[in-house]
Image: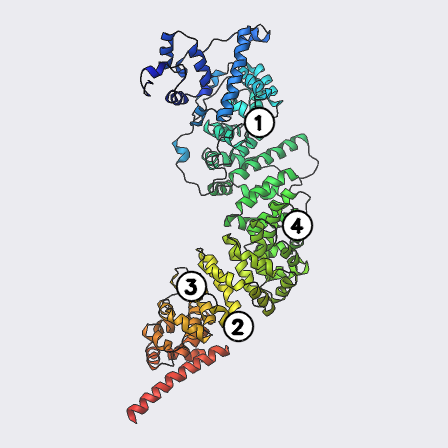
Amino acid sequence: MLSPAGSTDFAIQDVPSTKKILHVETVDAEETGQTLKSYDHEEKNVPEKARHQLVRNKPGSRKKKLEPSLKWKNLGLTSPFDEAEEKARKSRESKRILEYGTKSPASENKKKANFSGSSLPGCQSSQKIKTPGADDFSESSSEDEEDEEQPERRAEAATDLPSEYWQIQKLVKYLKGANQTATVIVLCSLRDFNLVQEMCQLAIRDVGGLEVLINLLDTDETRCKIGSLKILKEISCNSQIRRTIADLGGLQTMVSILDSPDKELKSLAAETIANVAKFRRARRTVRQHGGIKRLVELLDCVPDGVSLSKEQERDVELARCGALALWSCSKSTWNKEAIRRAGGIPLLARLLKSPQKNVLIPVVGTLQECASEKSYRIAIQTEGMIEDLVKNLSCDNQELQMHCASAIFKCAEDKHTRDLVRQYGGLKPLVMLLNQAENKQLLAATTGAIWKCSISMENVAKFQEYKALEILVHLLKDQPEEVLVNVVGALGECAQISDNLATIRKSSGIEPLVNLLTGTNQALLVNVTRVVGACATDTENMTIIDRLDGVRLLWSLLKNPNPEVQASAAWAICPCIENAKDAGEMVRSFVGGLELIVNLLKSENKDVLASVCAAIAKIAKDVENLAVITDHGVVPMLANLTNTGDDKLRRYLAEAIACCCTWGSNCVSFGEAGAVAPLVRYLRSNDPLVHRATALALFELSKDPNNCITMHENGVVKLLLVMIGSTDEILQEAAASCVANIRRLALANEKAKYG
C-alpha cells in the first residue's frame, strides 16, 4: 500500500514527489547553477544514508562543485567523464526549457540581486548594485502602463537548443571570472552573436549574465562599461529583460553614468535607458534619481550644417540618444512636467531645426507625446515650432511625417495653431499624405490632423479646394477604427458647410456612414452620428438615410450606455425628423421609441438632457406623437428640469415646453407643476437664443389665466417690454403676444370687478 503524501517513507522515493519539486522550486536555479533534474541525478548515485541527508539539505545549501582549471579546459585536457556530463547537462537543460519555457519555474519568483563588483577580479567596483526599494512604488503616476507584464514565452517545440545558446552561456561563465583584458575580449565575442534574437537574449539572462553586465557598469574601466552597455542596449529590447534590468538596479547606475565626461559612454547609457524606460516603474525610477535633468542637458548642442566634424557628430549622437530617452520617459505626466522644468522645451525647439533626420525623429516624437499637455501646446506655438513641423510634413521619411502630423493633431485644438498651419502651407501636404493609405500609423496621424484643422471653416474651404472630401469618403471602407474615427470626425466638421453635403452624397459617402452606425467603438459612434445628423439637413441625403433605415439605427443608439453617444444620437435625430417626408409616421413606427426618448429626461448628463429636449420639440410637432409622449409623462419630467442654470439646456427645454403646450391641458399642467416661475428667470440670461425660446414658451403658457398671474407676480412684464424692442422678430412677436395675453386678463378682471 502506498504511503500517504507527507510520510517519512515518501522522502526516500527514487522519483521525487510533487511536494518535493515544489519545495525545490523556491530555490533560484540560475543562482545555484544546478537544475532540478541534475539534483535528482546526483541523488540517485549516492548511498542510501547520504540520500536522506540530500533530501534534508536542498541544492541551495550544497557546496560549490569543483571544476577543472580553465587552463586545462583550454588545452582540451578535460576527462571523458566531464564531456559526458556536459552533454547530459545540455540535454537536461533542453528538456527543462521545453517543459517550462525559456525560464525555469523557480525564476518566475521575483529576484533581488545584491551582487558586488568584487566578484569580478579584473575590475574595481565602486559600489554595489542597488535593489528596488519601497520608494519605487510610493508615487502614483498618471500615465497608462505601456508594457503590461508579459507572460514567459515558451520555447518552440524542438529537439534541442541551437549551439549559439550554449556558446553564449559559456562566454558569460568566463566573464564571471575574467580579468580586465579577458572581460573586454568576452564582451566583444558576445557582440558577435545576433543579440536581436530572443534566444540569444535569454541565453544571457538564464545564466545570470544580466547581473554581471550591470555590475560591470559600476567599475572604473571605461572599456568594460562601453562593452557592457553595447550588449545591454541590444538585449533590452526584450520586455522581460528590461524589467529584470530595472529589478537589478541597472537604471540607477545608467543615470549616474550620464555625468561621465566620456560622450560615447553617455550616449550608450541614454540609449539603453530609452529601451528600458518602456514601463511605468522604470520611468519613475529615472525621474526619482535625477535622470530627466541629466537627459535634458544632453540636448544642448547646435548642429547647424549638414557636414559636421567628428566632435560635432559625437554631440549630435549624444543629443539623439538623449532625445530617445526623453521620448520614452515622456509617456509619464510627471516626467513631462520634469522635462519642462529642466528647460527642455527651448532645446527641443532648437533641435527641431536640425537637418539630421535621425535627430528629428526622437525630438518630434517627444514633442508629440508632450503635446497632450496644454503648457506644451502653448510653448510649441510661442517657440515657433509649428513652422518646422509643417516643413517636415514634406520630407521623405514616413516616420518623421507621422510624428509631425501627430503633433499637429494634438496642437490643432487651438484656433491659433490651426491658423498657423494654414499660413505656413501645411494643409496641402496633409492632403497629399492621405495617399499613403498603406501606412496605417501615418494615415491615422494625418487624418487626425485634418480633423482638428477642419474645425476652422477657413481650413475647410482649403480642403474643398484640394479635393480632400472625396479622398476622405473613399477611406470610409476597410480601415482600422483609429483611422475611421478621424476620417468621420473630419467629415463631420466639413459637413457644417452645406455645399459639402452634396459632395459627400455624390462621392457615395452616405451608405458607408450609415453602416458605421452599427459599430461598437464609442468615439466612432459619437463622430458618425454627428456627420449623419449634418447630412440629414439636406433633403436628398435624408431620403437616402431613410431608405437605409438610418433613423432606426440612430434611435437604437439612445440605448447606448455612453452619455456622449446618447447625446450625439439625439442631436442627429432632430434634423432627421425635421426633413423626413412623413416624420410623424416614421417616429411612431419605432416600437417603444417614444417611451425610450422620454425616459432619457431622467439622465443626469446635461448634454443628453439638452439634446433630448431638442428632439422632443421636433417630435411634439406631430399631434399624435405629442399625445403619446404626454401619456408617458413628458410634462412633469420637463417641469422638473426648469430650475437648471445651464443656458444650453434652458434653450432647448423652453422650446420643448412651448411645443408640448399645444396638446390638451398640458399648458395648465405645466403651471401646476411649477414650471412658470423658473422660466421667467430665464429672461435674465445673457444668451439671446434663450430669450427667444423662453418668450415662445411663456406665450404658450400665458394662454392659461393662472399662469399669467404667476408670470405677473414674478415681474415678467418689465423683462418682456425690453425684449419687445429686440431686432429679433420672432422674439419681438412672442414677447408682445405674451404681454398682450397678460394685459387681456388684467382688463377682464377690471371689467368683472367694476363692470
Task: Please report whichever mark, 1 or 4, sits nearer to the chain's N-terminal start.
Answer: 1
Instruction: Say which residue label 2 marks.
Output: 582
Looking at numbered disc 3 in the image, what kind of residue is underneath it?
Leu
Q: Quadrant of the C terminus?
A: bottom left
Question: Residue 434: which disc?
Answer: none
Disc number for residue 265: 1
**Of tags 1 and 4, which is closer to the observer?**
4
Q: Is residue 334 left or right of residue 468?
A: left
Verify CB contact (< 8 Å) between mark 4 and mark 2.
Answer: no
Mark seen at residue 596:
3
Kind of residue indicated by mark 1: Leu
Q: Which residue is mark 4?
A: 433
Q: Position of residue 298 (x, y in %)?
A: 56, 35
- Which residue of the protein is positioned furthest toward the right in this rendering? 307
Calculate the distance from the C-alpha at mark 4 to the C-alpha at mark 2: 44 Å
Give how far across and how far down residue 144 sits, in percent.
Answer: 47, 42
Q: Label 2 amino acid? A: Asp
- Disc 3 to disc 2: CB gap under 8 Å: no
Q: Secondary structure at mark 1?
A: helix
**The residue tagged with tag 4: helix, strand or loop?**
helix
Q: Could you classify mark 1 by the number of other residues whose Cα lies within 10 Å: few (under 14), some (14-19), or many (20 or more)?
A: many
Figure quadrant of the N terminus: top left
Question: In the figure, is residue 210 to the left or right of 626?
Answer: right
